[in-house]
Amino acid sequence: MTLHVALELGGGRDPADIEALARAAAAAEEAGVALVTLADEPIGGGARIEAGVRAAFLARRTARIGLAPQLHVTATEPFHLATQLASLDHASLGRAAWVVGAANTEEALATIGRAPLDAAGLRREVDDVIDVARRLWDSWEDDAVIRDVPSGRFLDRDRVHHVNFEGATFSIAGPLITPRPPQGQLVVLGADTLGVTGRLDVALVGDGPIDEVRRRAELARAEGAPLVFADVAGPRPLPELLAALDGVVDGVRLHPAAPDDDLAWLSTVDKPPLRATLRETLGLPRPENRYATTGRETA
């Protein structure tokens, strides 16, 4: 099988379940799963652990598997979102990814006192936040940190760039507060229905009939997505399904009904090997820094 495999791990929101989440992630890593995703909804009330914190918890309890929390552009301040994800990439030594969320219900947005956006406004918000996150991850050049003890210089300020960004609902001024992520840019996953497929590294398409999956995969590639994964919502039998999808998409994200059974089978199947970083695992190149390449300090 040539497909990459991602696994959605829905547990761990309750603090009592966090150790079970760690065991599940370790089992997925042992089975050769490329990455786990961590779904989330911005709903207030009660004790819960949001996806970014769950991913940080897993960063030092796993060694090779990718970690992809879902963070919502509508309910997370963009500078904080970019910083949290960059920090996760540092903590995991280059295994972080981001599942782009776009929760837009009254219940979800009530947690921050925001009204739902119309369709055009939501698409613009998703586009703006992905754009500014990528710019912020590039705001430090790879060799900006010099740690020159004799001179007392920690960084080369000429290699730290201000990002001046004016979006429809927010503005950003200044560089990120963390150095550039180990991967340069995190792997960004999102549904092909968000309307921003060209900004994604991995487009997620539904798991309908094979012909429909093929059509959507071809469209996503035409719109600029380097990789396409099919979102598979726990159908059986899994071997036949993956055999049918092999060559149609680059990978699958499983939402398993029986995780233990699926992992037991997946552990016996040849899959692309896990590498040092998630980008290397997925065969995605490490992007050049836009500011180092163009010599511009703002864009």
Image (cartoon, rainbow, N blue to C red):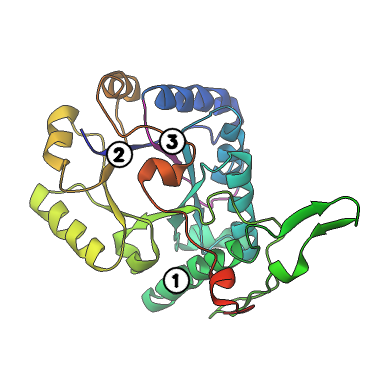
Q: Is residue 194 visible?
A: yes
Tag nearer the camera, 3 or 1: 3
Label 3: how many Cα within 10 Å (few below 14, some 14–19, many 20+)? some
Describe residue 252's horizontal placement relative to residue 288 as left or right.
Answer: left
Look at label 1 and name its amino acid. Asp
Look at label 2 and name its amino acid. His
Tag nearer the camera, 1 or 2: 2
Decide: marks 3, 1 in contact (CB < 8 A)?
no
Decide: marks 3, 2 in contact (CB < 8 A)?
no
Look at label 3 and name its amino acid. Arg
Relative to 223, say whether 49 is above or below. Answer: above
Residue linked to disc 2:
4
- Which badge, 3 or 1, comes first in the chain's sequence? 1
Report the disc number at residue 247. none
If the image is split into quadrants, where does the C terminus sit? bottom right
Residue at left offset 65%, top offset 59%: 80
**Could you say which quadrant of the image residue 179 lies in?**
bottom right
Residue at left offset 27%, top offset 43%: 251
Under tag 3, what secondary structure? loop
Label 1: how many Cα within 10 Å (few below 14, some 14–19, many 20+)? some
- The number of numbered discs placed on residues in the rendered structure image is 3
Which SS type dominates the magenta stretch? loop
Relative to 89, say whether 34 is above or below. Answer: above
- Which badge, 3 or 2, comes first in the chain's sequence? 2
If the image is split into quadrants, where does the N terminus sit? top left
Asked if residue 123 is among those painted magenta in the image, a careful observer would answer no
Q: Magenta residues, as a range?
A: 32-44
Task: Indicate the position of residue 196 as horizontal and vertical percent values.
Answer: 36, 68
Residue linked to disc 1:
127
Report the disc number at residue 275. 3
Task: Indicate the position of residue 175 as horizontal and vertical percent values.
Answer: 69, 68
Marks 1/2: CA distance?
A: 26 Å
